[in-house]
Image (spheres, helix red, strand yellow):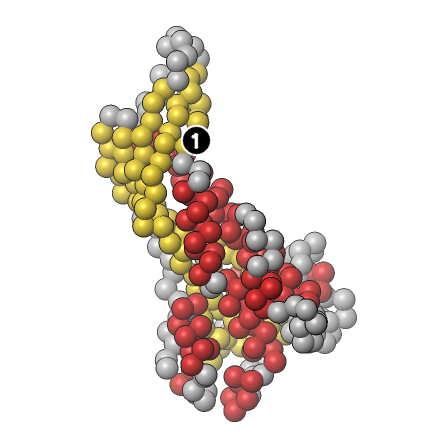
């Protein structure tokens, strides 16, 4: 099974509108990642990391092969990619792990959303001469989905012959299992289905048509999407907390499945 570099998630916008109604197509992208650490901390000099070609590894177990395909996973090693360098700032969860320990691996995920919406809007009953007026927007969503891709980085390349049983590799794949959980997409759909109207204030004289309505709709969708990404972030952190970043087995009474259900209410 070969592995090509992830294709960057594209963002499209198409609008067709009539008076008080419109159809929109849009997507957005968010980047987050989690880390595993051990040893002494040391700074990496930015340089090109190297890709681990799956063709150079033994065939992965069927479940892992499917996970790599669904999560669009690529493995790299060597100096940390620049995007991962910029996220390790004082105060974040990764920096908090630096006390006498060295970053060994990081899973970076890029999650995007896609949707179509049919939008209707109408004005409130305010005085037309007022400086502003409220517009109530009602949305009907369809073709809702999440798209995700991952880059798993290792400081040192895990041995090929034991790659699929290496504890660090398996821990990073647990991160991938969290962010590819199909229940996240269902949760996102449910959030859109239960939040189908918003009210916005428009200035006097401001043209109200789909070109001004769509940004309000997409901002609304982005806010709901952030609940999904926040949930993934929480679960990534919980995985690292319970397993000490892959160095320990799950404590009795906990499992990856219990983490997927952790903080289940959006």
Q: Where is residue 230 in the image (x, y as percent from the top left)?
A: 56, 51
User: Relative to 215, does residue 234 appear above or below in the rendering?
Assistant: below
Task: Please tell me in which quadrant of the rendered image residue 192 appears.
Answer: top left
Give the image location of residue 6, x and y in percent.
Answer: 40, 67
Q: Position of residue 107 (x, y in %)?
A: 55, 67
Left or right of 249 on screen, residue 54: left
Quadrant hosting residue 17: top left
Q: In the image as oriented, which residue stretches furthest toward the front?
A: 253
Residue at the spot x=52%, y=84% of the render? Answer: 164
Residue closest to the far bottom: 161
Q: Can residue 218 be seen in this view?
A: yes
Which residue is tagged 1? 198
Is 31 located above or below residue 192 in the figure? below
State the count of labels: 1
Residue 58 falls left or right of residue 123: right
Q: Residue at the location (56% across, 49% down)?
A: 265
Q: In x, y percent, where is residue 96? A: 72, 60
Tell me: 261 left or right of 42: left
Q: Is residue 13 visible?
A: no
Q: What element carries label 1?
A: strand
Q: Nearer the viewer, residue 227 or 72?
A: 227
Quick one: 262 or 77, which is closer to the camera?
262
- Quadrant of the image occupied by residue 220: top left
């Amino acid at each position: 099974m070969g592995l090509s570099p992830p294709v960057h998630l594209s963002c499209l916008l198409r609008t067709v509108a009539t008076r008080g109604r419109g159809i929109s197509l849009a997507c957005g992208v968010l980047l987050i990642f989690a880390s595993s650490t051990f040893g002494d901390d040391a700074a990496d000099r930015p340089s090109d990391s190297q890709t681990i070609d799956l063709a150079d590894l033994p065939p992965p177990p069927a479940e892992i092969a499917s996970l790599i395909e669904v999560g669009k996973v690529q493995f790299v090693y060597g100096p940390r990619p620049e995007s991962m360098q910029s996220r390790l700032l004082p105060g974040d969860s990764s920096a908090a792990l630096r006390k006498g320990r060295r970053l060994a691996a990081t899973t970076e995920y890029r999650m995007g959303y896609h949707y179509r919406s049919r939008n209707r809007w109408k004005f409130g009953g305010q005085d037309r001469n007022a400086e502003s007026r409220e517009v109530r927007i009602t949305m009907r969503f369809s073709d809702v989905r999440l798209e995700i891709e991952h880059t798993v980085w290792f400081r040192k390349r895990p041995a090929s012959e034991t790659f699929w049983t290496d504890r660090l590799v398996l821990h990073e794949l647990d991160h991938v299992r969290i962010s590819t959980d199909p229940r996240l997409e269902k949760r996102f759909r449910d959030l859109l289905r239960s939040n189908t109207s918003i009210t916005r204030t428009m200035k006097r004289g401001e043209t109200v048509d789909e070109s001004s309505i769509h940004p309000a709709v997409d901002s609304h969708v982005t806010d709901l999407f952030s609940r999904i990404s926040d949930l993934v972030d929480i679960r990534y952190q919980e995985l690292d907390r319970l397993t000490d970043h892959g160095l320990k087995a799950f404590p009795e009474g906990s499992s990856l499945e219990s983490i997927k259900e952790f903080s289940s209410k959006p």
